Amino acid sequence: MKSNNKTTLMTPDELRKNLRGPVVAMTTHFTEDDRIDVDAMRRLTEFYIQEGIKIVIADGSTGEFASLSEEERRLVIRTVVETANGRLTVIAGTACPGTKLTIELTQYAQEVGADGVMITPPYYGFNGFEGLKEHYRAVAQNTDIGIVVYFSGAVMHTVQNVLAKPELMLELAEAGEGHISGFKDASGNFHFYRTVCKLLKDKVAVMGSNGMNYYLYAHEFGGPCFLTGLGNIWPKVEIEFYQALEQGNREKALEIVNEKDLPYLKACVATGTYNGAVKTLMGAVGLPSGPMRLPFFACDPEQTEELKATCKKIGLL
């Protein structure tokens, strides 16, 4: 039995059509005594609305979801949905190690008004490709909400067979019984990404997740949306990049990639704590930052200065 009869629920097809342009995977913020900083989450949601971002992901990988309790995950999702109040498309991260847990959190996200959910394959493991299809089928059969499948870095070893055979994504989409609205690819495998963009075009919205440079050519193959960490701090740069592509100004888009996106990514990765780097730079521009929660580290003072120096040099700070 499906769990929600809300007339305002966004349908999976509506979510698919809404997945256009830059997407921000929101960070989760903590108080000094290690609680969810609800005020910071509200402030951040308002910031993205005012900056012109149309889609956010709450309680995802960038949001340190694996370090949150069940109660905290629900609080993050509810806070962002309530603050957005229909002004953003809010995708809630509801991935869990098991199918039953994933269904329950997805039902909660639907109940509080999320517009969609993002779900990785079960990150401990599953019974091959058939097990993967059954996982998404079970979520679809027990909810009404649109699903974004996410192949994250944490699960890449479990989906090697799919990466080697992109056409399997058509079977996975079919297993979702019309509920799979999007697919977020962080494989770093451009052949796979490009092929999936072409295969799933007009069926599932494919989202790139390795920087604007990763999306630059996928735009030509039908990928309608993308996500980068730079957008957490400087969303207007992502909007400018996307507008340039939509207007056919590839020279401008490539300039943004070379002058801002690639140097930013290199500096963040060099710290060895990418999530910590994102929060450090958020603090540098006056956005909520705050402490990290283990197993993620914050940037040390030397890393912080190097990050700031790079971002000043490329005109971001």
Image (cartoon, grey):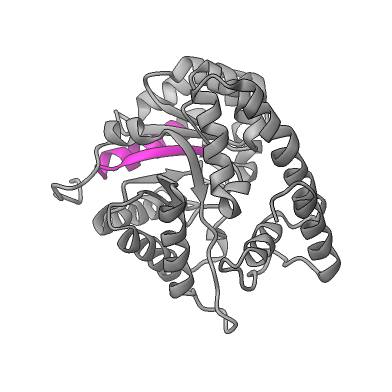
Q: Position of residue 35 (x, y in %)?
A: 51, 78
User: In which quarter of the view is residue 290 placed?
Assistant: bottom right
Q: Position of residue 264 (x, y in %)?
A: 73, 46
Q: Nearer the viewer, residue 145 or 291?
A: 291
- Quick check: is 142 in the magenta stretch? yes
Left or right of 144 in this view: 95: right
Q: In the displayed structure, would residue 97 be above or below residue 34?
A: above
Q: Position of residue 146 (x, y in %)?
A: 32, 39
Please tell me which residue is depicted at 36% across the width and 23% down the height of the picture: 174
Let me know if residue 128 appears in the view: no
Please tell me which residue is depicted at 82% across the width and 51% down the height of the picture: 270
Q: In the displayed structure, would residue 3 be above or below residue 75?
A: above
Let me know if residue 163 appears in the view: yes
Q: Position of residue 160 (x, y in %)?
A: 64, 29
User: In which quarter of the view is residue 66 placed?
Assistant: bottom right
Q: How many marks?
A: 0
Please tell me which residue is depicted at 40% across the width and 54% down the height of the picture: 49
Q: In the displayed structure, would residue 261 be above or below residue 171?
A: below
Left or right of 6 in this view: 254: right
Left or right of 283 in this view: 44: left
Q: Quadrant of the C terminus?
A: bottom right
The stretch of residues the image draws in magenta is 132-150
Please tell me which residue is depicted at 41% across the width and 61% down the height of the picture: 46
- Quick check: is 208 in the magenta stretch? no
